[in-house]
Amino acid sequence: MNDSRRPITGRQNPLTGRHTAPRDLIGDIHAQQRRKLFRRVALIVVLILALLAVGLALKVFADRRSRDACLDDARDGFARGTSAELDTVAERLDTCIEDHGDDPQLLGARALTRAQLLAEFGVGDEAAHAAVAALDATTTTHDGELARVMIALDDGELGQARADLEAAAAMRDRLSIGPNHEEWIAGMLAIADPEANLDEAIDAVSKTVEEDPSISLRRLLATLHMHAGDGDAALEELGRAREQDRTHLGLAADEALYNALLRQKLPGVADVADQLLGDEFATKLAPRDRAHTLLARGVVQIQDGEVEAGMQAVSQAWDELPGWDKLSRTLALEMAMEAGDGERARQWISEAGLRAPESEIYEAWVKLVEGDVMAALAELAKLPQEHPRVALLQGLALVEQGRWVEAKPWLERAEKFLPKRIDVEVARARVDAQIGDAEAARRKLEALAEEEPFAPRAWTGLGEAHLAVAYYEVEGEGVRKPRPEPDPDALKEARRAFKWAVQRERQPAEAYLQLAEITDRKRGDDPKLVDEVVELLTQAVEANDNLPRYAERQALYLAEVGRHAEAKRMLAKVNERPGVSFRVPLMLAGLALDEVEFDKVLSLDEGFEGWVEDAESRRAPGRDLDIIRARALLLTPDEPAKVKADKSAEARDKLAKIVAAAPTDLEAWTYLTRAHMELKDRDAALGAVRQGIEAVGKEDAGRLFLEQAKILFRGGKKRVAATQAGKGWNFLRDRPEGVSTLVLAWAAEETVKLFQRDGRAKPALTVAKQLTRVAPTHSDAWVLRASVELRNNRGSDAKASAEKAVELDPNNPKAHELLGQLYLRFGRKTSAREAFEKAVELGKDTPQAEDYKKSLASLGDEPE
């Protein structure tokens, strides 16, 4: 078969010449259809994916718009800055986070809001810490990191907060709800750090406020001004913040607090505080704003004398105040000081964790508040003298001690760095009253006492100013000159002011002391006032026993009025205390000499030399020491004649120098006369008497008339001697100011003896009665009167006088012995024996000891 006839079943390849397999047209058609289908499906898938991508993009865009809207709302609320707004912002952010998942920006915004609520208002401690803990550790945000810094700040971790703030501030982003909030935190760190530069912080925040005048930043700026001591700038900035939002309760609380700190507009402070703490706002007030309000209210109450209520409010405030709020904590501590609550102040100093020297300054302040001025000054001397509060406390302490000249520069420095303090104004006026223009000081203190009736020492200062006006007048170019007689009206006003001080001041020891001194001026007219004076001095000591000057004055006064046993016990005790003047040991030495001179004891107290040394070491005047030593030289009863003469000559020389330097020194003339008599130089003694009377003046020379009388009596001139003694007694009786009761009693006794020896019984009785009128509380005065009445056969009167003497001093052996004599006169032998036994017991170491024994022996043996 011919191959050409075969049917062609495939296609020949033109290159190889071979035939390919024949095509399946139907399969090709199906394949082509499948390919078209695949293309359609792919196209649909792509379209679906594209639609899904667009939808997803739209959702992401919508979500971001929604999130950004959340952040925008949060930013607006955060800028308004009230606690209510911040709380609302936080709640809305919670909702946004639920809707948008754990978005880092939202988490950071919520954390910052919660941290702000805690740091500024004290709200939501747990919520703030939880919000910070919920932050994404891998994705950090500006707001989240700022929140971490704020939590560290509120926890008191200042070092950590300061270190982290720089990194957080570098993360600025457009989505932050507090784009400038690192400046707020930096300002708060400056407030919390005692070593920070507040001026730099103020400049930084001021610049930020120009661009971002949010309320929280304005409020911070006001707080910075207040911490820097510029109250006016603080209130001005606070006013701008309040113009932005009149409903911001925290700003109202700040205004009340700042005015309270400045001690101004206190009635208005009380009104605002009462409104904020009332039912309408109480639940809306944030804890720290409430603390500021309570503190402000407490300040007003303490200034108004409602100390207990005021300290209750301040104590409640303290519990809510954060550690970094130095201004408020300082004010609370100052209120504890003003209230005299040293125990609470010490507790708060410990709780505050103050660093040196602040803690030491406040410890010294507590000592000053408790009246321990010497201890306070000792502590302050160790502290930085350039510190304003050291200057303040130094000045106040020195004023309390009456060291006016030293106090003045300290107070001037305190007023420069701590302006508008009422305690400094009062203290400066008190200084001016003593060493400056007393009349101007009086006007100043009158105004202060009227405006701030419970201001520390305002009434005491006013009383002191009235006294200065009463005793001094100003001549020429402000030169002070003592008035011949005190101004009675000024004295009356001084008494009134001191009485107000007793009622209104804490520890009014100085007021009690000055009332005692004013009252004692009338002792010459009404000797019975002695008991009232002693009571006032006792109250002064009770008001402040930490300052020894009050116990010192009480002891010295007891010695002046003849209550020597009490005086000696008290003087010996006071002499051991630091800060006591030379007058105490000098008085002890003088009393020891008096006891020997006036036959109270046989020999000089063994403590005499020690007391003289104490007086000398405390810079007693040389004149006073020479008088004391001269008197001691004249007490030589058992010495050989040569020794007695030498000592008397030494005493004479000392005393002669004194009268040569001070011709009106009555005491020196008195003992110079006695020195001449010890040397048996009668003419020199009489010459000294005449010179002394001429130099001192008759009316003030009563003691010299008595010395002259004794000399004349020894010369046999009884009548003249008695007459001169009567003159001397009359001068002393009429002008008892500055004359000790012991000297008055001695003068009366000498006069009575001379009248009796001259046979003049009636004048003798008159003198004895006059003595009990001049010294009605002195036991020996009544002993003398009883003895004269007995001698004049007035037994009943004598018995009454002797019983009075025992009542006034149960330890007076003379009183008991004389009462025994009177009991015998009335046939009361048993009572007489008891009285004599008491005299023997009490008088065993006195020169009269043998006489007391003889009186007892005269009764014979006691019947069985």
Image (cartoon, rainbow, N blue to C red):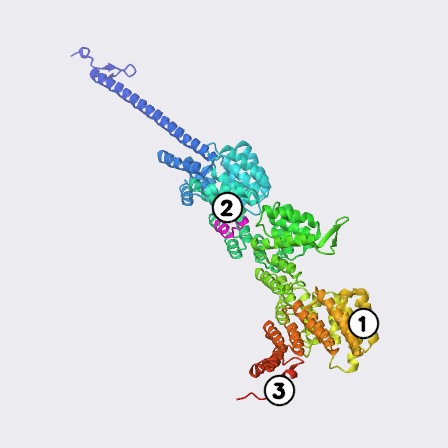
Quarter-of-image position of residue 526: bottom right
Numbered label attached to residue 858: 3
Determine whether the residue tagged by mark 3 lies in a helix, strand or loop. Answer: loop
Stretch in magenta: 292-313
Q: Residue at x 43, y 34 (%)?
A: 74
Based on the picture, tell me whether residue 299 belongs to the magenta stretch.
yes
Residue 768, image x and y in percent?
68, 72
Amino acid found under the numbered disc labelled 3: Ser
Q: Going 53% across and 46% down the picture, which residue do you hit?
A: 300
364 lies above or below 603: above
Q: Nearer the viewer, mark 3 or mark 1?
A: 3
Q: Earlier in the sequence, mark 2 or mark 1?
A: 2
Which residue lies under the disc numbered 2? 297
Instruction: Name the spot of residue 323 as percent of width and height, x first.
Output: 50, 48
Could you tell me if the residues under marks 3 and 1 are in contact, i.e. CB atoms within 8 Å?
no
Question: What residue appears at the point 67 percent right and 56 percent down from the top-left corner?
Answer: 403
Main SS of residues in magenta: helix
Callout 2 secondary element? helix
Q: Looking at this rendering, what residue extends furthest in the left direction?
A: 1
**Residue 797, image quadrant:** bottom right
Q: Which residue is mark 1?
A: 653
Counting residues from the start of the chain, the first of labels 3 and 1 encountered is 1
Work out how far the residue at label 3 is from the one at label 1, CA to CA, in angstroms. Answer: 48 Å
The location of residue 128, given as percent across then percent down, is 42, 43
Quadrant holding the N terminus: top left
Which one is nearer the viewer's eye here, 304 or 625? 304
Q: Residues within 10 Å of mark 2 (few under 14, many from 20)?
A: many
Name the residue nearer the viewer: 209 or 186.
209
Amino acid under disc 1: Asp
